[in-house]
Image: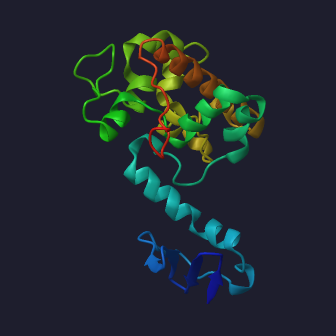
Amino acid sequence: FRVRAARTLYLVSDTQVGVYRWVMGTVVKWPRAAALSSAPDRNNVKTVAEIQFLLLPVHLDHHAQRRPSFEGIQNGIDRPATLELTKMLSGLPRYTLRCIITGALATRSRLHKFDPEESPDCPHCPGVPETTQHIFGECPKYKTLRFTDLGEETWTSLPPCLKYHGIVPLLNEQIAAQFQSQVDHKQLGCIVQHNLLDIWQERQKWVEARQPVPRWGEAR
């Protein structure tokens, strides 16, 4: 059966979901069409939101395989715990946290991909690429901030998706025993995200600020 959205068509069978999109006058098949573990109930899958929920485990698994720093999200994300702090922030801190969660921070390694003249190295560790994992998990310059609220042993045991992106996974077995309840999940998410924000704020002191460039080119 099929579910149609404005520019997207979902073709659902007992074994897979195919996604087709209308782009620039051409029908394009989405490359991540997914195999399903069980046949969906046609009576319960009628809207785009329900289709996307059906595909969510496949998306998460693909994302974790493509970007190791997101390891731990394969079995789902505790959305309320992950987004708790964003409700309390505004302006630049909120924007920065969203970039941390989505993996969109302007690290030197990431900027180097867009501009080869930019050095990809950490300002404190010559020869070592400045990645999200390096900033939040490895660089000795930020060690004190990293363990401000959580001990080194607890921080090290956290799943990558949490300690590098502040994303709280659903599985309790990946979380320390003292943070097992839903309330504690939110507390843990806020603690880790605060630490990540503090580390990034400190990192910004050592890197020359870049002026935003309009996507449409230089203003005339």
The residue at the point 51 percent across, 56 percent down is 60
Which residue in the rendered view is the most extreme toward the left? 127
The residue at the point 74 percent across, 79 percent down is 44
Coordinates of residue 203 in the picture (x, y in percent): 46, 17
Quarter holding residue 28: bottom left
The residue at the point 28 percent across, 24 percent down is 121
Coordinates of residue 91 in the picture (x, y in percent): 70, 28
Q: Is residue 61 left or right of residue 4?
A: left
Quadrant that contains the N terminus:
bottom right
Total numbered labels? 0
Coordinates of residue 218 in the picture (x, y in percent): 45, 38
Check the image and report above or below for 89 versus 45.
above
The residue at the point 65 percent across, 76 percent down is 5
Q: How is the image coloured?
A: rainbow
Coordinates of residue 215 in the picture (x, y in percent): 48, 44
Check the image and report above or below for 53 versus 80.
below
Q: Looking at the image, which is closer to me, 114 or 20?
A: 114
Q: Is residue 148 left or right of residue 85?
A: left
Check the image and report above or below for 55 versus 67.
below
Q: Looking at the image, which is closer to me, 84 or 214?
A: 214
Check the image and report above or below for 163 versus 22.
above
Is residue 80 in sight in this rendering?
A: yes
Is residue 176 in sight in this rendering?
A: no
Which residue in the rendered view is the most extreme toward the bottom? 1
